[in-house]
Amino acid sequence: MSRARLGTIFAIVFVDLLGFSLILPLVPFYAKDFGASDTVVGLLVASYAAAQLIGAPILGRLSDRVGRRPVLLISILGTAIGFVLLGVANQLWLLFFSRILDGLTGGNISVAQAYISDITDEKNRARGLGLIGAAFGLGFIIGPALGGILSTIGTTMDVGAINWTYALPAFLAALIAVINLVAVFVFLPESLTDERRADIANNPNTSFSLRNLRMAFQRPQVGPLLTTRFFTSLAFTIFTTVFPLYALKRLDLQVNQTAFILAYVGILVALVQGVAIGRLSARFQERQLIFASTALMTLALLAWALTPSVTVLLIVLIPLAFSGGILSTVVNSALTKVVSVEEIGGILGLSAALESATRVISPTLGGILLDILGAWAPGITAALITAWLTTFVWRRVYRQKLSTQAIS
């Protein structure tokens, strides 16, 4: 395992997510300035995830065939252009276009994960992927706070026709993306050899097609892991997307208090992925960790639904963040071990696309449950999802030995 290249890819993912999360909280307010309704704001937020749903598997498959480095370069360039367009947007359609472009090219986390898989062995892979998760979490902790500070500074600027409240964070995010682009170009060598790329090009399973994506779910070890990835992400994103409204309705928390609690969750997830994953994966089999984590998430979500106070909430969030952090890393690590090495980028891209799909579904589902049934309903629903998933994992994952399967 190359520590230098692991450190480089960690820095690249951190900077990438820092730029993304820097503008994330500001986009809805930006749309409101153009007179967008709540429904249009929701569509704008969902447009990024929907575009990533399309882009992530394509980028993953493409990286299998042409290499990780060129795909990272192209995707980061697209992200930089998207941020510039966001900063200069003077109409709502341009705002949508900037988010869709960023979504299509922003599915490069799966490519970074594939890079990690290329330079690690099966013993160290979960630890390596955990570092990606830690970089992801740290970017999300620092980015929103920095974006808020920059937007405050931007309100004092009056240069040209640009709305600097939103343009200043967007332009800094674009600059960060450009720095990232240079870092990949200068410091990150290609992880796939010419021989590996030739093997991939001759493997029919690495071509991008709906048939191959459908066939992935039908494979006896891949399908259950992808199913696990989708439903754990669905349950966890129900929590993250409705939490601000839940916190207001159930605990009467204000925006700044909610932000601190979400940052607390981010820190917990980053600690799990950056520190605990390596130790746990060295001691337990991945199928054991997946089963235990789905069961723990069920109990944590149930407790979250019934939380009576902020003190109890802070305690409940520990097992919830712990189980979520483990599952997001270990399921991907297991996926890389049940496909051939030529398919790793594609399968991680598909996994990322499934996670993106949950970020399209969860805000709507969680909002409906919150409005119709009350603050307890999203947590109970998410707990029911993971309770079913725990039995599914027991039958289809835990009781099977996860090993590389023949390509068919």
Image (cartoon, rainbow, N blue to C red):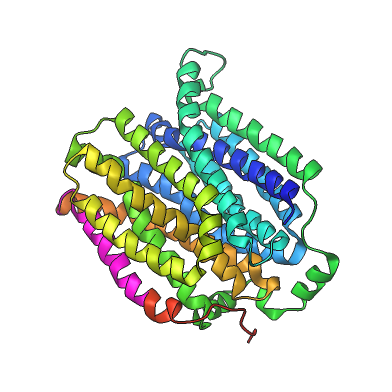
Q: Does the magenta stretch include residue 381?
A: yes
- Looking at the image, residue 218 sits to the left or right of residue 206; the answer is left
Residue 97 point in image, percent of width and height? 53, 44
Can residue 78 be seen here?
A: no
Can residue 249 be seen here?
A: yes
In the image, residue 65 above or below residue 204: above
Which residue is pictured at 69% across the width and 72% down the height? 341
Residue 315 point in image, percent of width and height? 29, 44
Specify start and end residues of the magenta stretch as a single range.
Answer: 373-392
Which residue is pictured at 69% across the width and 39% down the height? 180
- Looking at the image, residue 366 sits to the left or right of residue 292; the answer is left
Q: Quadrant of the C terminus?
A: bottom right
- Looking at the image, residue 344 sits to the left or right of residue 241; the answer is right
Residue 343 point in image, percent of width and height? 66, 71
Q: Quadrant of the N terminus?
A: bottom right
- Looking at the image, residue 399 sits to the left or right of residue 362; the answer is right
Which residue is pictured at 19% across the width and 55% down the height? 377
* Quadrant in the picture for residue 310: top left
Residue 84 point in image, percent of width and height? 61, 34
Which residue extends farthest right?
A: 194
